[in-house]
Amino acid sequence: MRGGKREGAGRPVGSVSAKGVRKQRQLRAFDDEWEIIREFSQIVKRNPERAKRMMKTE
């Protein structure tokens, strides 16, 4: 059988937030920079308020 509706196919229910779907972005980084970016991106996704506090500089 090819194509058509299949059980379990498609985007999981609840994977789209009220803001919509996240856009894909592209950047270049060295491996050590990428580790920092990856870790910070998880903080941004899980706790945006904490990320904002971390970015404040005075």
Image (cartoon, grey):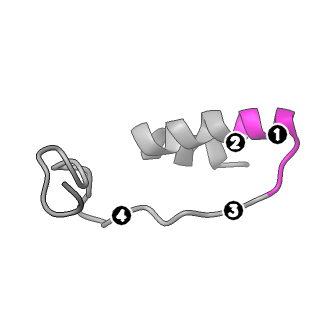
Indicate whether 42 appears above or below 48. above
In the rendered structure, the answer to whether residue 27 lies left or right of residue 19 reads right
Indicate whether 7 appears above or below 5. above
Q: Which residues are magenta?
A: 28-36
The amino acid beneath tag 2 is: Ile
**Circle 3 sits in a helix, a strand or a loop, which is it?**
loop
Name which of mark 4 and mark 3 comes first in the sequence.
4
User: Pointer 2: what residue?
Assistant: 37
Q: Residue at x 21, y 50 (%)?
A: 9
Q: Rounded to the nearest whole Å, what is the CA distance between mark 1 and mark 2? A: 6 Å
**Circle 4 sits in a helix, a strand or a loop, which is it?**
loop
Q: Is residue 47 visible?
A: no
The amino acid beneath tag 1 is: Glu
User: Pointer 4: what residue?
Assistant: 21
The amino acid beneath tag 3 is: Gln
User: Pointer 3: what residue?
Assistant: 26
Name which of mark 4 and mark 2 comes first in the sequence.
4
Determine contact: label 1, label 2, CB under 8 Å: yes
In the rendered structure, the answer to whether residue 15 lies left or right of residue 47 reads left
Q: Residues within 10 Å of mark 3 (few under 14, many from 20)?
A: few
4 or 1: mark nearer the eye: 4
User: Pointer 1: what residue?
Assistant: 33
Specify whether residue 30 is painted magenta. yes
